[in-house]
Amino acid sequence: MFSMIINTILDIIFVAVCDFGIQGAAFATVLSQTLVSILCFTYIRKNISFLLFGREDMKFEWKLLKLTISYSLISALHQSSLYIGKLLVQGAVNLMGTDMITAYTATTRIEGFANSFGDSGAEAISIFVAQNTGNENRKRAKQGFYTGLIILVCLGIGLSLIMYFFAKTTIEFMMNNANNKIMINGIEYMKTIAILYVLCFIGSSFVGWYRGSGKVNIPVIGTILHISIRVILSYLFIQQFGLKTIAFATGIGWVSVVTFQYIIFYRSKK
């Protein structure tokens, strides 16, 4: 979250104030990530130094290497499919002209900030579930998942309300001197997607559960399902209904993914 805030501030400074263009956005991303990395390393070294490792900790194990490669490849597929899908959706938006592109860019920035809470929650659930699953304490792992799910649902509802009622304010903050068409498209998108945004956080909770329990293929299947629905519906209906088509397509994708995740979770309990 801190990285997102710094990135946004630097974007405004480098792009809006200094007029560095696309290079300014790139510099902002690199600098914010570098700063956060340094701060995290400094904190770990000072407060939880036992997490650091030395030469004596480096031991080679084929079994562990194979498991790591397996999980890494699946996680890489998960992330790559996610961003390939985003590029395809961006392609649909690009067909609609500059105003639509500008509105979509502003709203995705706001979404990125909101999503940082869901992503962080998924990571926290994943770590907790993995630790307790490895310790063969499945009951505590599930308790942690349910607690994390409740927290993320509350966060999702809160962020949905903010995104809905402050859509105009947040877009004006992201886009100085935006014309009326940009504002209308941006507000329509924000208010539409805010209605179903809590489903995104429920999905993040399940992603944390499946990653932590070693079923890393489930989030990949869910992401491919979501992206497929989002891309297909976006290209089919964006000409008729504009930018809110992307929001509806995203929401329908979330409904499908959460349903799929819950069915797998329910069956695994039997």
Image: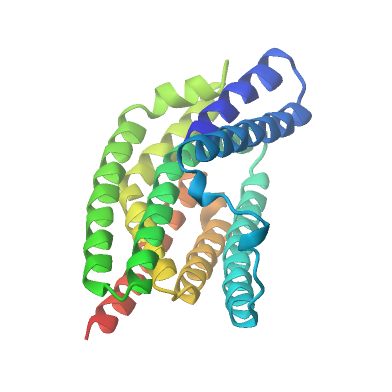
Farthest residue in the top direction?
17
In the rendered image, the quadrant that contains the C terminus is bottom left
Q: Position of residue 64 (x, y in %)?
A: 58, 77
Q: Nearer the viewer, residue 36 or 19?
A: 36
- Locate residue 121 relative to residue 55 in the image: left or right: left
Q: Position of residue 20 (x, y in %)?
A: 77, 21
Residue 89 visible? The answer is yes
Q: How is the image coloured?
A: rainbow
136 to 150, vertically: above or below: below
Q: Position of residue 230 (x, y in %)?
A: 51, 60
Q: Nearer the viewer, residue 151 or 21?
A: 151
163 to 198, vertically: above or below: above
Residue 258 visible? The answer is no
Q: Residue at x 68, y 58 (%)?
A: 55
Q: Residue at x 74, y 26 (%)?
A: 24
240 to 28, vertically: above or below: below
Q: Splitting the image into 4 quarters, where does residue 166 fall?
A: top left
Number of numbered discs: 0
Q: Splitting the image into 4 quarters, where does residue 29 fall?
A: top right
- Locate residue 117 relative to residue 59 in the image: left or right: left
Q: Splitting the image into 4 quarters, where does residue 30 fall?
A: top right
Q: Position of residue 28 (x, y in %)?
A: 67, 29
Farthest residue in the bottom direction?
270
Q: Residue at x 25, y 48 (%)?
A: 151
